[in-house]
Each structure stands twice: as C-alpha cells, then as structure tokens.
Amino acid sequence: MKKILLACESSCDETAFCLYDLTSKKIIDSVINSQLKIHKDNGGVIPELASKEHYKNIDILLSNLLISNNINLSEIDFFAATKNPGLPGALLIGYTFCKSIAWHFSKPYLSINHLEGHIFSSFLTNPNIPFPHLCLSISGGHTSLYLITNFLEYTKLGNTRDDSAGECFDKIAKLLKLPYPGGKYIEELAAKKKLNNIRNYPISKMSDNSISFSGLKTAVLYDVINNNWYNKVEKRVKPETPLEFIIEVANSTQYVINNMLGHWLEKNLITHNTAKAVTVVGGVACNNFINEHLKKIVEKKNITFFRLEKKFCGDNADMIAYVAAKKIELNTYENSYQEEIKI
Ligand code: KG4
Ligand code: ZN
C-alpha cells in the first residue's frame, strides 16, 4: 500500500507543495506558485507582500494538487514543511497550515530546514551521487560550501562574510534597472555580447575559508558614479545610460562572481581531496556560464560534476519532501507539533 508524504515550502516568494510516495521513493506530483510577477519591479522580495500572497494562494494550490491526483487529505500519512531559515511571516503561513492539517488527522509532522533541502536537492535528479562530495549552495539567501559525508550528514566548510551570490546579482541588477531576479537578467544581458572588455572590479580572496561579495557591489556602484551614469534620486542608473555600458557591467559582474566561486571551490577541492563529486545548488545554480566554468574545474580533478535540473535550483517543495522522506526512512525524525514558534 502507498504511504504518502505531503511537503510544503513557503520560505520566500514561492508557495510550493509536493506529494511524495514513500513506498516507491518517487515524487507523485508537485506544484509551485511563483510570486515573481509581484516582486519583479521591486528589485527584490517585499516580505509583507510575500506573506499576503502565500496566505491568498496556499489552500487553493493544495486543493488543486490533491484533486488532480485524486488524493484525499485523510489519505496522507506524513506532513512536512520548511521551518527555517526564511522570511518569518512567509514561513509561518506554510508550516502553520501543514501542522494544523497534520494535527487534525493525527498524523506525524516534520519540520525541515530549507538549507538541507537545497543541499540534498541534487539527489532529486541524480540518486547515485557518491559520498563524500562537496556541495556549493548559492542562492539569494545564502552562499556556503559543504562537505557532505552521507545522507543528512554534512559539515559547513565556509560561508559568505556578507551578501550571498544571489543577493549581489540582485543588488547590482537593481542598480542597473533590471528586474528581479537579478541573476537571471544579468545572465541574459551578459550573453548578448562576447566578453572582451572586463571592467576593473576586485576579485576578493579571503585568508580564511570565507567568500565576500560586498567589494564587488561597491566597485560597481563607484564605476557607475564615476562614469556619470548614476541618478542620485532613484539610486539607479540614469535612463540615458548606454546599453553598451550596462551590458559590460553585467558581463563583468557575472565574470567576477564566477571567478570568486571558482577559486573558492578549487581551494576546497585541494583541501578535501577525498571528495568524489561536486554538486551546485540554489537559485544561482541556474546560471549556465557559472555551471560550465565550475564543471571544468571539477572535471580537471577527475571527479564528477552534477548539474542540477533548473526546476530544482530555485525554491521548491520537492527538495523538502526528499529530506523529509530520508528522515522517515532513516527514522531520524521527530513529530514537531509542539515546537515553539520563534520569530
Ligand atoms: O534559491 P532561490 O530561488 O531562493 C533563495 O533561497 O534565496 O534563489 C534566488 C536567487 C536570486 O538571488 C536570483 O538572482 C538568483 O537566485 N538567480 C540567478 C539566476 N536565476 C536566479 N543567479 C544567476 N543566474 C541565474 N540565471
Ligand atoms: Zn532557497
């Protein structure tokens, strides 16, 4: 008989659900309601707007998923939702919703860490990734490098000191008057022209095992100011800024972020030379230019680079279901109804 898990993700600007068959270890179906249209012109996610959208859509999204799979709420055996980290209001809506249903049907409820979701998301496309491996997690909320020794067993090797890679893309994109998510639009713009002139932005190298993007962000701002293309009132480029200049800044931004991530990974592949593979996860892992560069670095070491399918790079409930299912399989979960809500 099928055992079904329902997982929810609502930590930022996506409301998502996944139905997972615990017996066959396969995704039955999943759904995402992205709020991109709402946040596109704001240069980033507005937390209050995000919470409102989750609240507005969550029940209809789940109803539709259940109806289209002919599954009744009472047939679900386990419930799970992202607990942290993320936008407090957005998280609260998703996990309170799931917890209440689980409680109503007296079924177990699991709290899942969003970062663990990303870290193990590569297994959704490649179930045979060997251990140990390195995982570079690059998104809007975080930039970290991990050594993964087994399912749900990992050590953080390094972190960003300031902005995440995605945040750096987003802030520079906002300055260039590009929509959110900035990384996507910077990549699209950069692909329009071959990179033959790289602007003089610093490639920060830290003495410890951290990474930092704030120097790049400041260098781009001063580049725009020094070239007289800065509109002080709008805090963005002037409307008459030449497209050539914007493309060159976009191209150079991507080049520097790519280089910094590459150096960081290379350094860690030397220190952790037992690693048999590398995975790259999170929203920035959508970027083709970065993937190709990292793949070359990894393959030079004669180890495997696992590229994540684009649909699993950004936030999704499939990765939350995967971690919850592993916890159930390994019997390492706690029923978390009573967990205190800490904001
Ligand atoms: O994983 P995600 O959807 O949300 C978080 O958990 O943060 O990542 C969103 C981030 C945004 O900062 C966005 O600019 C970046 O992923 N991103 C990209 C691309 N597509 C999205 N960055 C670089 N290149 C892309 N193609
Ligand atoms: Zn995320």
Image: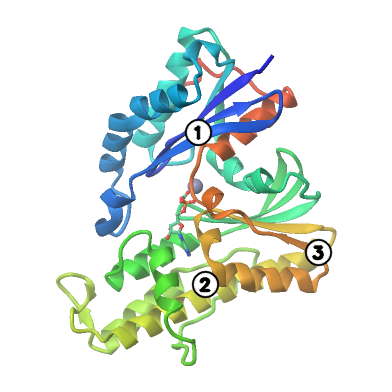
Q: Name the image quarter holding residue 297.
A: bottom right
Q: Name the image quarter holding residue 329.
A: top right
In the displayed structure, does residue 259 sit left or right of residue 201?
right
Q: Secondary structure at mark 1?
A: strand
Q: Amino acid at mark 3?
A: Ile
Q: Secondary structure at mark 3?
A: loop
Q: Nearer the viewer, mark 3 or mark 2?
A: 3
Q: Amino acid at mark 1?
A: Thr
**Picture coordinates of residue 277 (x, y %)?**
77, 58
Residue located beneath label 2 in the image: 257
**Picture coordinates of residue 337 (x, y %)?**
51, 16
Measured along the vertical axis of the image, is residue 293 above or below residue 281? below
Q: Tell which circle, 3 or 1, labels the residue nearer the N-terminal end.
A: 1
Q: Residues within 10 Å of mark 3 (few under 14, many from 20)?
A: some
Q: What residue sits 50% from the left and 8% below the top?
A: 105
Compute the Cα span from label 3 to label 1: 32 Å
Compute the Cα span from label 3 to label 2: 23 Å
Q: What residue sits 58% from the left and 23% below the top?
A: 5
Q: Tell which circle, 3 or 2, labels the residue nearer the N-terminal end.
A: 2
Q: How many marks?
A: 3
Mark 2 vs 1: CB contact within 8 A: no
Q: Residues within 10 Å of mark 2 (few under 14, many from 20)?
A: many
**How is colour applied across the structure in the image?**
rainbow
Measured along the vertical axis of the image, is residue 269 above or below residue 130? below
Q: Secondary structure at mark 2?
A: helix
Compute the Cα span from label 2 to label 1: 29 Å
Mark 3 vs 2: CB contact within 8 A: no
Q: Amino acid at mark 2?
A: Ile
Residue located beneath label 3 in the image: 303
Q: Can residue 282 be seen here?
A: yes
Q: Can residue 162 be seen here?
A: no
Residue located beneath label 1 in the image: 82
